[in-house]
Image: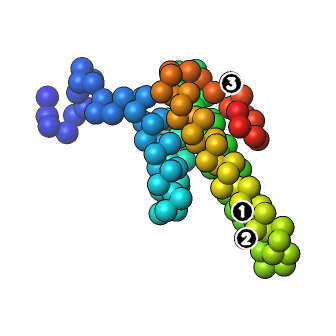
Amino acid sequence: MSPIEPNSTRPPVVSDEQLVLIVYLLYFAAYIFGITALIGVIIAHLRFPDANPLLGSHYQFQMRTFWIGLLSLVAGAVLVTFVPVIGVAILIWWLIWSLVRNVKGLLALNDYKPIREPASWMFG
């Protein structure tokens, strides 16, 4: 076997559960660095099709958290320029909403439980 051929008997470096955890951690880091959320949603999109149902619920929840959150951020940023009170309210709501979703997902993963309603617009 040549050194560039994959070895199917070797376990992955990072388990599926750890990858879900990494996505949640990347989302938390995004409050400071921003770009890490994009890395997290890419991982979630790539791993979702092959994930077991439990982890799939987390990946779906993470993907929706990113896309709904991005929609909220864009709406809040645009409205800040025209109607500052509403724009700031949307941005504050996004912060609270995304923190609750990320904490709830992280706690469910820690208990090895699926997200009950991963397609929810609220808190799953």
* Label 1 residue SS: helix
Q: Mark on residue 91?
A: 1
Residue found at x 72% / y 62%: 91
Which secondary structure, mark 3?
A: loop
Q: Are marks 1 and 2 in contact (CB under 8 Å)?
A: yes
Question: Vertically, is 80 above or below 32?
Answer: below
Give, as a three-letter code, the residue at label 2: Ala
Mark 1 or 3, which is nearer the eye?
1
Circle 2 SS class: helix
Label placed on residue 116: 3
Under mark 1, the amino acid is: Leu
Q: Marks 3/2: CA distance?
A: 31 Å
State which quadrant residue 74 falls in: bottom right
Residue count near mark 3 (Cα–Cα under 10 Å), binned few <14, some 14–19, many ≥20:
some
Q: Is residue 80 above or below residue 63?
A: below
CA gap, disc 1 and disc 2: 8 Å
Q: Which residue is mark 2?
A: 77
Q: Residue furthest left?
A: 2
Q: Quadrant of the C terminus?
A: top right
